[in-house]
Image: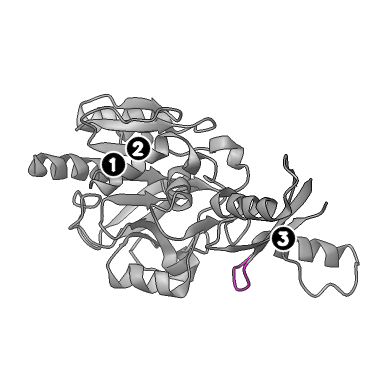
Amino acid sequence: MNSAILVFPGINRERDMARALTLITGHAPAMVWHAETELPPGTDLVVLPGGFSYGDYLRCGAIAARAPVMDAVHRFAEGGGLVLGVCNGFQILCEAGLLPGVLMRNAGLKFICRDVHLRVERSDTPFTRGYNAGQVIRVPVAHGEGNFVADDDTVRRLEGEGRVLYRYCSATGEVADDHNINGAAASIAGIVNARGNVLGMMPHPENHVEAVMGPTDGRGLFAGLVDHLGRAA
Amino acid sequence: MKARVTVTLKSGILDPQGKAIEGALKSLGVDGVASVRQGKVFDIELAGGDRARAEALLKEAADKLLANTVIENYRVEVVG
């Protein structure tokens, strides 16, 4: 699996992502600078990592979403290529119009940096096939603006089309306001586009892939992508 | 030519920052504040002198970058 990680000024999770991808896919990803206008030939997966692109100026992800490399990402996604945005990457994908909605300031106003539980809503997608539907995974979050907001019609459409892949929940998988860490609509932690090839999520699966970090629940996401691409090939 | 673009949150969008400011004003004893919504103001210098063209350009700037129309409204003014 050939991955490309986009590098914007102010991003700080690109090396964590590269480490996780190298470990699980067996190939070091290409690091692609934001000013590039093409992705490396043969790219299977484009990753927009976490961080604070452009210092979160204007709105989180707003400037990065208009960077030169994003035209290539739009073309790649339109061609069915897999795109994963984590944290600031999710914010960038929303600002770029590749995903609906927007990530607002956490309802409780605090920056949240801790492990959370996520319920995997379905397993029949490239981004979740490494898990079972209903499985609860533990991964970290680190964000001040992860409160997913969209109009009621959009949220209804996301739910109706099964596009909510990850949801904040309790350790036993219960979805309730108490476990909705940032006030997100419908406890949404991760969604895909209508075609199902672009995922945005606030939590960081790339940080739970090695035993030295404790849980390794994040591995399933990447292993699932490898499996998906292996079958497609 | 000078212009101003004002970006505000649409009604119904939760504004935790505005709420925090509202709470701070109340705790400072500033009486009579019913609610606060936070927005942004962009003061922009334009190169040309054509007013109609300026308004079109500002609208383009707001649509493409300054506002996220999923959650925000904007107003453009050429102030002379």
The residue labelled by disc 1 is A76
Quadrant for the C terminus of chain A in the image: top left
Q: How far apart are the two marked residues, 3 and 1, measured between alpha carbons?
A: 37 Å
Label 2 sits on residue: A72
- For this orientation, the residue located farthest to the front is B50
Q: Work out whether residue B45 or residue A17 is closer to the camera in this orientation and state it.
A: B45
Q: Are marks 3 and 1 in contact (CB under 8 Å)?
A: no
Q: Mark 3 is on which residue type?
A: Gln
Asked if both marks, 3 and 2, belong to the same chain, the answer given is: no
| Mark 3 vs 2: CB contact within 8 A | no
| Chain identifier of the residue bearing label 1 in the image | A
Q: Does any portion of residue A208 appear in the rendered image?
A: no
Magenta stretch encompasses residue B1: no
- Front-lying residue, A32 or B55: B55
Q: Which residue is mark 3?
A: B38
Q: How many marks?
A: 3
Q: Is residue A184 above or below residue B4?
A: below
Pointers 2 and 1 in contact (CB under 8 A)?
yes
The chain that hosts pointer 3 is B
